[in-house]
Amino acid sequence: MLEHKTERQAREEILKLVAAYCDKYHKKKNIKRGSDSLCVPRV
């Protein structure tokens, strides 16, 4: 996958893959008021 690339090209590809991963798995979901989701903070 990265064997025939320069260090700079490999670094750019890795950063793109990490960005895609973060977008997919770490984005906060928009929760609207009145939705079925219940979130109760501890007091």
Image (tube, helix red, strand yellow):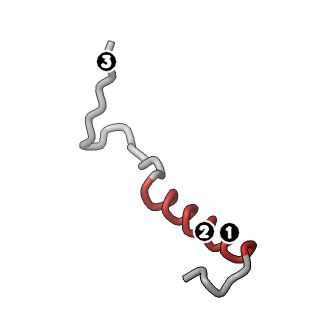
Give residue 36's quadrant in the image: top left
Residue occupying the point 60% across, 68% down: 14
Quick check: marks 2 and 1 in contact, CB under 8 Å?
Answer: yes
Secondary structure at badge 1 equals helix
Residue 32 percent coordinates (x, y): 39, 43
- Quadrant of the drawing holding the N terminus: bottom right
Q: Position of residue 39 (x, y in %)?
A: 30, 32
Residue type at mark 2 is Ile
**Up-down: is 4 above or below 30?**
below
Name which quarter of the figure residue 41 lies in.
top left
In the image, is 37 to the left or to the right of 12?
left
Identify residue for label 3.
42
In the image, residue 43 above or below residue 26: above
Q: Nearer the viewer, residue 28 or 25?
A: 25
Relative vertical location of residue 42 with respect to residue 38 in this rendering, above or below: above
- Which mark, by number, is residue 14? 2
Element type where label 2 sits in the image: helix
Circle 1 is placed at which residue position?
Answer: 11
Callout 1 amino acid: Arg
Please tell me whether mark 3 sits on a helix, a strand or a loop. loop
Which mark is first along the chain, 1 or 3? Answer: 1
Crowding near pointer 3: few (<14 within 10 Å), some, many (20+)?
few
